[in-house]
Amino acid sequence: MSVIISVSLASSLSARQGLVERRNQEKIRTAGFADVELDRLHAEIGQTLFDLQALAVPEEGPIKDPTARPTDPREGQVDADTLKQDTIELVPSRRRAFVRGTDSKGRTYFRLRITEGLNYTTEPTPDRFLFKAHAYLYLDEQGKLGEVLLQFYRMRFSGMEYTREIRRIRHPGPFGAGAAQSPIQIEFRSYPTSLPHNELAIDDVPLPVLSGEPQLLTVLHSADDPMPFDKQARIVETYRSLLRKLNRQLSRQRQILELDRNSSIERALDFTGTSF
């Protein structure tokens, strides 16, 4: 009898806990996955971006001549540090870590390099790929953060086939205290050969606006096709982690750019020649 009572109590407790968990999940969904830390990160990134917009390097734009190598010094499209290297992809230019450009919709964007390099995998078969992670950031009319686009571009080049994959996390906003994060979008694109040249920057990074429809496009909390809550929570946590890294790198870029600017001013004011 005691065993039956214990099993019944355990089952009742489990059901009650499951009900509480489902209610909490619905509350989180109703609030649009609002998060205090995300609000702080959005505000800090927007403020730093506003302060740095005048120091961003102008984007050279798409590759004008698809047959010309981006590292060809005769083209005059890259800086001297990059020209010393055999390929622009493997040793990216420090000068192009933070650039400003205009997308095909006429909006001004700021692109920050997150990381670039080579990677290798042995599962399920040996493979290697080149990856480029960048963040596209937009300011609204009030000078605050208006949109965040985190882009991960991977090029597999093992064997005879070249496959290009683009994974994106886009937050169209709006941002503010208590703002909903539910509009976050997940996007996946795959190209068996290459992207159109007019959709690539001079350093072979896909531009923020691409033609065609992605193979996968889903919204964090879509009313038409809601995804499981654990997947939603994982997306929010991934986005939070990426914003932390983005905020650190943007702050570091601020130090570098301001130091370069102040050094240039100091050299211009040094009439004795000691700074040369």
Image: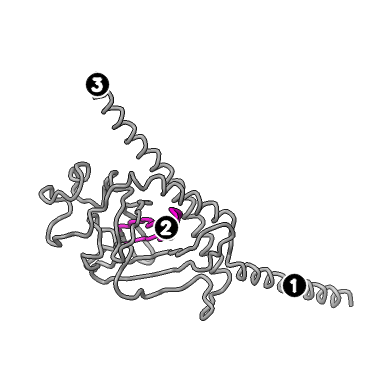
> Considering only vertical position in the picture, is 120 above or below 215?
above
* Magenta span: 130-154
Assign the C terminus to one quadrant of the image.
top left
Label pair 3/2, CB-CB below 8 angstroms: no
Please state which amino acid type lies under the numbered disc 1. Ser
Residue drawn at (43%, 64%) of the image:
170
Residue 275 lies in what quarter of the image? top left
**Disc 2 or disc 1, which is closer to the eye?**
2
Q: Which secondary structure lies at badge 3?
A: loop
Mark 3 or mark 1, earlier in chain: 1
**Disc 3 or disc 1, which is closer to the eye?**
3
Residue 129 on the magenta span? no
> Considering only vertical position in the picture, is 194 above or below 87?
below
Mark 1 = which residue? 14
Q: Which numbered disc covers residue 271? A: 3
Residue 134 on the magenta span? yes
Identify which residue, 84 or 75, lies in the foreground: 75
Mark 2 = which residue? 141
